[in-house]
Each structure stands twice: as C-alpha cells, then as structure tokens.
Amino acid sequence: MSNIPETGRTPRVQIRLVVIQVLVFSLFLTLGGRLWYIQIRNGQEYTDEAKNNHVQQVVQPAVRGSILDARGIPLADNETRLVVSASRTELMKMKDDGKGVLTRLAGVLGMKPKDVMDKVRLCDAKTPQPCWNGSPYQPIPVTDEATTQQALQIRERAEHFPGITAEPTAVRRYTGPGESNTAQVLGYLSPVTDEEITKAKDTDSPFLRSDQVGRSGIERTYDKELRGKAGVTRYEVDNLGRVIGQAAKDEAQPGANLVTSIDARVQGVAEYELSKAMKAARQELDRNTGEKYKADAGAVVVMENKTGRIVSMASQPTYDPNSWVGGISGKDYAKLTGKDSNYPLLNRAIQGQAAPGSIFKVVSSTAAVNAGYPFNGGYPCPSSYSVGGQVFKNFESKGYGSINLGRALEVSCDTVFYGLAHREWQKDGGIKPKKHTNDWFYKTAHQFGLGKETGIDLPNEVRGRVPDRQWKQSFWEANKDSWCKQGKKNGDYVEKIAYENCLEGNRMRAGDSVNYSIGQGDILVTPIQMATIYSAIANGGTLYNPTIGKAVISADGKSVQEIKPKSHGKLPMDARTRSQIDKALAGVTTRGSAAWRFGGWPQDEIPMHAKTGTAEVYGKQTTSWFVSYTEDYTIIMTIAQGGTGSGASGPAVRKIYEAMYGLDEKGGQDLKKALLPKPQTALPKIERDGSIEAPEIEPYKPAEEEPPAEDQQLAGAPARRD
Amino acid sequence: MAGTNGFSVSGYGPQRGGLWSQLSARDSVLRKLDWPLLLSAIALSLVGTLLVWSATRNRTALNQGDPYYFFFRHALNTGIGIVLMIGTIWLGHRTLRGAVPVLYGLSVVLVLLVLTPLGATINGAHAWIVIGGGFSLQPSEFVKITIILAMAMLLAARVDAGDQQHPDHRTVAKSLGFAVLPMVIVMLMPDLGSVMVMAVIVLGVLLASGASNRWILGLIGAGVIGAVTVTALGLLDEYQINRFAAFANPELDPAGVGYNTNQARIAIGSGGLTGTGLFKGSQTTGQFVPEQQTDFVFTVAGEELGFLGAGLILLLLGVVLWRACRIARETTELYGTIVAAGIIAWFAFQAFENIGMTLGIMPVAGLPLPFVSYGGTSMFAVWIAIGLLQSIRVQRPITA
C-alpha cells in the first residue's frame, strides 16, 4: 500500500497481516466452491430429495375382490369388523415401551397381556409367530373381533390408550358356503413384507405398506387382480407432518372379483365324503400291519374333462382359513405348521405325492401298445412273476391265464405288466444298457405329463417323479456316499438295500423296471396329475392345464376377462387305443376291481369308468387311489395309509357322483336333486352395479343308510358321523 | 514517533463539541468512514432481516402468532447495532482503550453470572442471561470484544510507546492470561463454539501483534493438544461428540444428529442457481431445518435465493473482511492493527464455521452468522466491532 507507516510497524507484522488476508480469502473461496458444488453441480439430486421430504402419502386401502364359485356364491369376501390396532412408533416413545398401555388394552379386550404384546412385536429370524411381519410404521392389528362396547371404551378414554385405534375396517372373510371349506384352494393373506415392497417397487403393481398379500392358493395366484389399487393422496407437509397442501390424488380402485370353477355345493359334498371315507378307513383293519388304517391324509379332485376346470378340490387334514384373518395367533400357527400338525396347509391334491399303484397301468398299457404289443394280444397273467430270483406277486389280483391288456386293466393284473416291462428292459440291454435305449415305459410316462407340473393355477405345485435312468443316476450320485456308509452285505433289510444301492443304484435293474410298470417303487405322482391324465382319456386325449380361476370380473362389472382352458399336450395314444382303454376302464366298474362298489349304477345312462390303485409305501400302510370318470367329470380320491383303492375311496367317489347327477343308491336319477349334472358353462349374472348374483345354497345332506332316529340326532354334527 | 499520541489529532472525540458540527466539517467523520464496509454490513443485516422473516413466518410456536415478529425484531436489533456503532465511533477506540479494564471486568462478571442461577440454557448451551421482557443476553458475544481490546491494550502498549519493536514474552503471557480466564468460564457453560472463536481471535491477535513465532506455533500446538485432551478425558458433552460424529458421516443417523446437516444441505442444494424465491422454499416453509433463523439462516438464502443470493452473502462478508484487512494494514498504531486483526479473525472464522457447517464441510457448532443470523447480542457485538473498525480508520494518524 502507498502509506505504510514507519512507526510501530515492522515487516513481521506487515507480512503477517498479508498472511491473514490470504487465509481469509482462501476460506471464502472454499465456501464459494462448496456452494457451487452443492447448488449447481449436484443441485438436482438435492431438489429431488427435497421433494420426497415434503410429501406424505395417505393410503386408502382398496377393497379386495371376492372369490366366487361357478354360480356366483362368494367363497371369500370382505366384512366390516372393528379392528383394534396399536402403533409401534407411538408405543416405543413411552418409557416402558408401551407395556402399560398394552396391558390396559388386554384388560379391555379380555386377552392376556402377553398375547397382545406378542402380536405387536416385530418378526425376525428368532421370533416365533405371533409377530408382526409388516412395516413397523404401520398400525398393527391386535384384534379384529372387538365389540362395539370395547371400541367405545378405547375411544372414549383415548388418553389412557395413546397409540391405540379402534376403527371399522374391511377384513377378509372366508364364507364357507354350504359348509364347504375350500381352505387350501383359497389360500390366505398376510401383510406385505419389506422385501416384497422393495422387489415390486418398479413393477406396474407396486405394494403399499398397508397391503395384504395372498400367500397361498388362488389368493396368491390371482393376488394382483384381487388386490386392486389402493388410493393414495399425496399431501405436502411440513416437518411435523402438518398438511400445507395437496399434491396429487389417486382414487382407490377396488380389486376385481374372481369367478372360479369351484361349485360350492359339490365342494361341500367332496369334503364331506373325503372326511367320511378317511374316518371309515380308520375303522378297517390293515392285514399287513395288524393295526387299523391311519388314514392320516387325503385328497379329492373333481375336474371337468373337456376344459380342465376344477369343480372341487379338497385336502385333508384341513383348517379354518379364517384363522389367518387379522393376524394369526401363536396357538393357531403352531396347529397349522407344527411338527405334530400333519401340515394342514398343504394342498395334498397338488402337493401330496405318492406312488400311483395300479392307476398307473393306463400309462403302462399305452407304453406297451406304443412299443408294439397289440392291445388285444394275449399276455400271461400268472399269480406271480420271477425276475432274477426275486418273486413279484400279483397284488390285487389272482392268476387269469392269458388275457389281453384291456382285461389286465379291468382285473388289475400286475404280472401282465411285469412281463412286458421285463421284456422291454431286456431289449434295452438289461443291466448293461445299450447306447440308445427305448425306455418305452418311462418315455410314455413323460408324455403323459408325469414328472412335471400340470400348470394348475395354484402356487407351489409339486412335480412328482418318473424314476428313469437319468433320475437313477443323479439320485445315486447324490446318495451313494451315505448308502455306501450305511450298507452291509448281510445286514437287516435297510442295510441290505443300502448295500445294493451303493453298488449299482445308478443302474436300472430288472426289478426296478418291473415294479415301476405297475406304479410302485420310486415313481411319485400327484392326484392332480392323475386327474389330468384320466380326464384326457375321457375327453379324447387332450391334457388340460387344470384351472380354478374362470373369469376375472372388474368391480364395476364392466370388464369380464375369461380364463380360457389351456392344454399342455396330447396323450401319446391313437384313437383306437384310447377307446380300448376307455372300454376297459368301464369294465373295471362293471366286472373288474371296482365292480363291487358300483352295483346298481346306471351304466347305460351315465357310463362310469374307473381304476383302483393301492400303492406300497415303505414303512407305512398302503396309499389308496381311486380314479374315475364319466363323460363330463373326472373324480380322483386318494387316502394315505388308507388301504385299497376300491375299499377306502370307491364308495366316497360314488357318493359324489350321486350328488352331482342326482342319483339314488339304486341308480334312479332325479334331476331336481342333481347338483351339477352338466358342467356350469355360463358365468354368474352380473348386475348393473357390478355386483354378482348368488343363488341360495344349502349344506349337503347325504342320503342316509342309518336309521332315521340316529340321523336326526347327528344331523347337527355331520362331521362326527361314521 | 511523537505523532503516535492519538490525543494530538483533531476532529474526533466527545470532548470536542457536538456530533453534528463534526459531521458537517470538511474533514468530517462521515467522509472518513469506510463506506464499502458500512454499506456491506447494512446490506447483510437487511438480507438477514428477510431471511429471518422467511424462516419464522410459519413458526407459530416461536413467533407468538405474529409472522412479522422476527422481521421487526431483527430490524430493531440492526437499528440498535447501528446506534452502538455510531456510539463506538463517537467515543473512539482510543478513548475506549482507557476504559478497557472496566469493560473487560464487566464482561467477565457477566459471563460469570451465566453460571449462576440467573443463567439460562438455550439449545444445549448454557450461555444466556434472561433479562426479562423477552430479552436475553449472551455475554460471551461481548467477551469476544473485550478479549480483543484487553489483549490489544497490553500487547500494543509498549510497542506503540516506542519502547520495543515487538511485545516481549512477559507481555504476551500476560495478555494470554487475560484471554484464557473468560474462555475457561465460557467453556464451563458449555459454549464450545464461542471458545473456538475466541481461540481463533487470540491467534489473530497474536499474529498481528508481532509476537514471536514461537508463541504462534505454541498456541496452535496447545490448541491441538487441548482438543485431544478434552476429547480423551470425556470433557465434551454427548451432544458435542455426536455433532462431530455426524459431521464425519451425515448419514449416520438421519433422524437424529445427522438430521440438521442433512436437511440443511438438502435446503441449500435444492436452491439451484436462482433459488425458489423468497417464501417459496419448501424446506423453509416446511420447517425442515431446525434453528433456521439463527445458526442455519444461511440455508434460507441457499434455498430461496439460490447460488446468486447465497453467493451475494459470501461476497458482502468478503467485502467486510477485505475492508477490515485494509484498515488493519493501513493504521499506523499497533493497537488499532491488533483490534482490527482480532475482529477479522472473529468474523472470518465465525462466518466460515457457520456457513461451512450448513454446507457440510465443518462440524455443527452453535455460532451465528454475523449480521444475518437472528440474535440481539450477536448483532450488537458485530456492530460494535464495525464501530471499532471505523473508529480505527477515522482516527488514523495523519502523520502518514
């Protein structure tokens, strides 16, 4: 500067003042640079963040669509209940984490304080049900069965119940029309998890925190359609959440209604008859084990032959689907999933698998024909067949001399199939297989759709298993180590088997092939697979994907989307073979293994075809199979540890047909009593306002053999009648 | 050398007739005033008035239902500040030099009072004396001035008298003692932010005094050691440690400690080049930034006035400091140089810390932005400082 004084100032001070000035300006340059970086360079990022900051969503949940039976009767709908919910965020603000409030609440609701607290805790890996697996920021329902009195008590003394709300809310209701249950088919709902929200974030149907999601059954398959779209109002808010303006509003769109092919009446009959058949089986003595049959699980499917639509599907043991509504209690959850529960959540019609036994013989017959054995040729049916020193017995049958394949089906002669399978096995090279084997019996099974899903519109269908060479190899590779460790040449049965498996478990042995030809051994099928196969035989050879959903009807009734039948293939048989097998299966009911169960059946008016099966299960009692079809329907019933097919399931299946066709025991038909003599093709009538007309329904009253007095006495408790 | 006696210079001082006659004189105070400095300070205060208004318009819990409450209060504070500045110029920093022991003693008593039941805690800092009638005083703001004056008086006395070229060790040690006493008291409040400012003031003062480099380096070393010790011994409160932790990682706890810094940055970042316009910032309207009228007032500028507006504030502060630096360099007496340098250190550091924390480059500390932040005591203090700077300029010896 121009006027540097000479007094009191030294260069030291002067230099230092310059240093200070430089320092100050570099500080301000830093600030300016940083300001530019935040505002100009990264400004957009912060602008977006600011937007999120100021918008709060208020969600009006969409009413979930109803699930209707084929005639419009609701199987699942919604009802308004008083739901008492607790806000975790509020409770956690309290000194005792809300324990005091929850204890008071338990008092009002007449619940145990521990039960209430369990319901509002958050689920994690270590916390067993009951717990909350929804968002912790969302009110957690404590009960949906509050009385008006209880709700008033909570509301009027709001200061005693901070964070607790009691509000009428639409909750799912499984109506169980006509005493049907349909539990495993319908499935259930539970709150959406954080993971699912993240996953569905960028799809066209994102989840909201408050959403309930179908967890199994058609609730899950058709979740997107049923759920609708929650209404979201976005408010601009300040930091305390006070509304300072409305940003956007999307009206709630109620979910569509789903019409299914289920007929609630037939469902009721099928459930009743399955349960009754299982109870009857438990009274029977199993001559193999010397104990009564356990009959611990069973399934029945009624399917339309020409569409693959499911008229009825029941699985035992079963449960009350309403126990899931409003959060499941710990006791209920244990009952449904615990070790001793026998897993009632499983839909055994699509998730139960067992060896098919003799009902597999239609596959073997077709395989034989395709391999070049004429259907009407003569095949020896001795009482036993010996392969390499091992004797295979004719299980359900005696010796019949030389018979054709049709007769072999009728009387379920095992040895005919043993012989055929053995010859094919030898042709393929026996224990040292050729490079290119025919494997007719296995190939045909695959062509019938075994070993893979039928494609039914229910989640988690299992595939069963065709124990072909490929499977044997991979199974052996997976298990040989443990087999070789366990196996002993001269040990007990299990050890011997393990020893053999260790040595040559990867090879197709003669015994494997022979056993497989009659549906025993390692083969596994599901009831729905066999139903699909038999309905294909009935309809001329088309393998339909079984379907339960029939039409999706929008809430206003204006859009009706029919779900068309889909096929996944044709049976590998020509028309002649088909009609020969068809004839043989009719013979089963008139003069074959099921004839004793179908005395008096009007075979000329309603031709009945059937096949019985009894599958061996190592260490357990036999699985009973009974599959049958008429022109329009296939009905299959299976009972695990239930004895023989004709014994346990035959009469029950006949009862279902009788109810559907309006038959009495002597075969007289009364069409007025018939529930469904022809498949329901038309959709239920849709009213102008979108509501769907539902006919009245009455519970199934089985025609009784018992004296009338006892009948009256037990009428109120049909489940106990055996 | 003889010219360094300030009392021989004409055209100043209360003992020389009325203010008006001086103002109208040819070599009047008005003409000698550093106008860029004054106008920048006034502009900052006015911008501050708008920003404080915008930040508090909706804060009904604070403004007692009157949207203009803080607008008027800030304008009033500015007015009082300007009056205090005029008074300071009128008295002159050299006259005040004589009163320094009294002022210093008074300010120490005031900070001591804070530690008595008269003191009040606001925002975690026990730094206030409630006077009543809605007024409260933050004595640590005045201490900043009295530390500067006391140290300057001691350090400059023998140099300005021509006895020595630089203050000797004894003088430096003595002056440090005068600084440390109130700093310890403020530390006990605890008002860590103010202590930090005072430490930087001491550094600035020592630099300008020409004290030997050993003192400067020693002081910096002592600061570092002190900071380490304080942290190691756990003398800091939980909230103070958390502030530093949140500074290191703002995403640490976005709902808690990191909230302020996050929201502050969102506010500034969303302003862009030109801002949302006054009263139109959603972060500000939605009150997402806590303490937005005081410590975080810069975020209002960032959001509503954008890079241009916020940059203008930086520029105005820059002008204030540039003029202060000029004054420090151009005055011939060490006393004035030291006082100016102390004020520079004070303003520069406080502004840097305040704006830096809103931009996420400094940890959060409860310090107001000079002239802009709402707060009476702080406003009075910075205007008195402007008065001191002006007085140093006005009373510059004409010998040069």
Image (cartoon, rainbow, N blue to C red):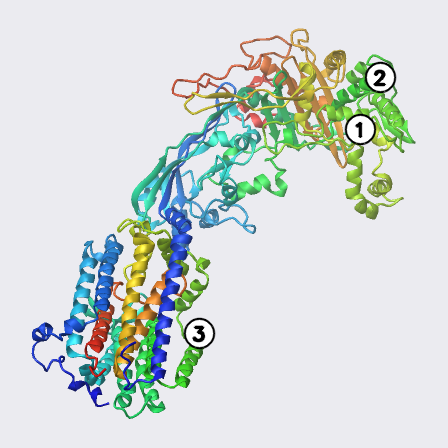
Q: Is residue B279 above or below residue B149?
A: above
- As drawn, which residue projects farthest toward the front? A2
Which amino acid, mark 1? Tyr
- Most foreground residue, B238 or B34: B34
Closer to the N terminus: mark 2 or mark 1?
Answer: 2
Mark 2, residue position: A373
Q: Is residue A266 above or below residue A157?
A: above
For the point 32% across and 72% down, which residue is it?
A: B194
Tell me the SS state at disc 1.
helix
Q: Quadrant of the N terminus of chain A?
A: bottom left
Instruction: Estimate the x, y position of residue B180 in percent, counting from the top left.
Output: 33, 82
Q: Quadrant of residue A446?
A: top right
Determine whether, in the image, residue A527 is placed left or right of residue A180: right
What crowding class fits label 2: few (fewer than 14 Cα within 10 Å), some (14-19), or many (20 or more)?
A: some
Chain letter for the residue marked with disc 3 in the picture: B
Do tags 2 and 1 sit on the same chain? yes
Q: In this orientation, does residue B133 appear?
A: no
Chain letter for the residue marked with disc 2 in the picture: A
For the point 45% across and 16% down, which residue is it?
A: A685
* Badge number at residue B231: 3
What crowding class fits label 1: few (fewer than 14 Cα within 10 Å), some (14-19), or many (20 or more)?
A: many
- Most foreground residue, A508 or A705: A508
What crowding class fits label 3: few (fewer than 14 Cα within 10 Å), some (14-19), or many (20 or more)?
A: some
Which amino acid, mark 3? Thr
Chain letter for the residue marked with disc 1 in the picture: A
- Measured Cα–Cα span from mark 2 to mark 1: 18 Å
Mark 1, residue position: A516
